[in-house]
Amino acid sequence: MAQPEGLLYSKEHEWVKIDGDNATVGITDYAQDSLGDIVYVELPKIGRQVVQFASVGVVESVKAVSDLFTPVGGEVTEVNAGLENDPALVNREPFEGGWLFKVKLSGDAQTSGLLSAADYESFTKES
Amino acid sequence: MSTPVSDHTATPLIFESGQDGRANRYFERGKSLDQFLPREALRAELPIPDNSEMDVVRHFTRLSQRTFGIDVGFYPLGSCTMKYNPRVNDAMANLPGLRDLHPYTPDDQAQGALRIMWELERSLCSLFGMAAFSLNPSAGAHAELAALLIAKAYFKGRGETKRDKVIVPDTAHGTNPASAAMCGFKVISLKSDKRGRVSVDEVKKVLGDDTAVVMMTNPNTLGLFEDHVHEITRAVHEAGGLCYYDGANANALMGNARPGDMGFDLMHLNLHKTFTIPHGGGGAGSGPLGVAKHLVDFLPTPYVRKKNDSFVLDFDMPKSIGPMRSFWSNFAHIVRALAYVYANGAEGLTKVSQLAVLNANYMRVKIREFLETPYDEICRHEFVASAQELKKETGVRALDIAKALLDRGYMAPTIYFPLIVPECLMIEPTETESKETLDAFVDALRDIVETAKREPEKILAAPVTTVVGRLDETRAAREPDLRWRPTS
């Protein structure tokens, strides 16, 4: 499974795309494939302050309910409203239209503990 | 699939068949309803189906033929113990003196019924090493809730109100954390080790003066015996906590090992699993809750006691958490379970679990020839196989194997549980199946795996012989259509 370059990855299988102070978060292709057909996504409220690696929501598939963790800390500025009616978008386009929420980064060192595309690729092969 | 149904079209709802005036009428029309009821209580538009008696009989017979159950075929649903339900149990539960007994019958006129409850309770205590059982809860999760309410009352009585954490291993049944959360506890999930067991060190790391209960299943949901259970329960007790035994897997050790001896303070049994009561489809269950000596006073009311030579329902238990449900639980199930206990005796029940373990290991060793079996060691009453490699090779997943088994006349095993095994199939044959049945199922599974390697599209299209084919699971979860509504 190809991992897009230019993104950072968490060991909980989220990806984050950082653009200045702003970050976009989603789950990886590996994660959506393991979960199977996604039926509900519960996202954090806009304006909520989230701490890196904290549980901020829930992803429910036909197989299981899984916690959603945020790979970065800061304030939630936007959520993907399209997922309410079409959560399967996460299955179809995990790295594009299926993004989950956006965060305005707080402070420094918000990317510590995250993996590069290559490191994440080998991490998924070990587990 | 070997169902006797000849056509493969969907059966119309009873509301969608028939015609006005078709129902057979055996009696003369009486007075019209408006002579009995006020006008505003009459509903002109209520569409009551109007079918002939024969069409009604055919309708429900056909539906019953399309239902898959243990009476139709092999049902290897892991963690659910779908064993044969002996008919003698039903014969006992249908004895008119028991069947027609009113729940408000005074104790002195219901001595036989109370004695049945008392004898079953005594049997369970001796089989599982507990001081007392409440027959009150109606299911396993109901008993879990009762147990956690007891733990709460127990700690409150001791002034230990800080204890608000329940520790649950990742091999637990989903009901454990759900019951704990429902009862207001904080849930701590515990990762199992490489051997699929709960490690003593990991438990010790999270134990403290805020620990209320540690909930364990033994054997766990991987079908493996928790071999450090003594050290774990000792450590929990040293930290001042209580240990709960989830008895969903009691069919693996009944008569051979007792949760009471392992150090558990609370436990439940599923009479509808281990004690041959028909279940599935959300029907009535029975989940007796067992406790050690120091928790007896907290049991739900009423509790059957023997006083001199007679039996009474005791409601006067000041420390009790109160009744968990109406009346005296699902009494017919208590009769069925006691019939099963007496039909087998202690020796027979011991053999039941030994044969359940033997059957599971026989299948595990045959199935590992063509599917991965992670944690490959002697299992108890069930084991897990994984389609992870097959999925990489062919694209065929555990879900597709499950669907293909339906085409071959079997109920599918539990899939995607426990969550720690990817593409998991959890297989529990039970003791009541013959070697021929086990062999035939293994052959069917082998055929599916071989077909997947040759022609994966065939398996991906399954099921093709059932009344309906592959369902849209996402839509079923998001837009369930479960209720008929009148159209006009």
Image (spheres, coloured by chain):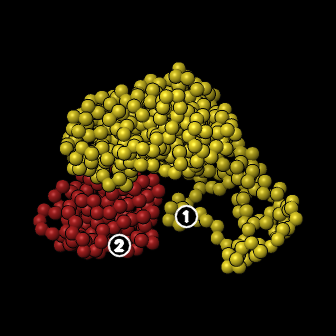
Chain colours: A red, B yellow
Q: Seen from this angle, which residue lies furthest top?
A: B347
Residue positioned 76% across, 53% down in the render: B7
Is any atom of residue B287 visible in this view?
A: no
* x, y percent for residue A58: 35, 61
Count of numbered labels shown in the rendering: 2
Residue positioned 44% across, 23% down in the render: B256
What residue did someone put label 1 on?
Answer: B480
* x, y percent for residue B52: 83, 61
* x, y percent for residue B12: 72, 62
**Image quadrant in which the C terminus of chain B is located:** bottom right
Query: In the rendered view, would you say B436 is above or below B75?
Result: above
Query: In the rendered view, would you say B470 is above or below A89?
Result: above
The kind of residue tagged 1 is Pro
Instruction: Mark 1: give few (<14), some (14-19) or many (20+) Cα within 10 Å.
Output: few
Q: Is B373 displayed left or right of A26 in the figure?
A: right
Discs 1 and 2 share one subunit: no
Q: Quadrant of residue B348?
A: top right
**Image quadrant in which the N terminus of chain B is located:** top right
Gap between marks 1 and 2 measured at Cα:
24 Å
Mark closer to the observer (1, 2): 1
Residue positioned 22% across, 41% down in the render: B207
The kind of residue tagged 2 is Asn
Q: Is B484 displayed left or right of B256 in the figure?
A: right
Chain hosting mark 2: A
What residue did someone put label 2 on?
Answer: A80
Q: Seen from this angle, which residue lies furthest left?
A: A108
Instruction: Mark 2: give few (<14), some (14-19) or many (20+) Cα within 10 Å.
Output: some
* x, y percent for residue A63: 45, 53
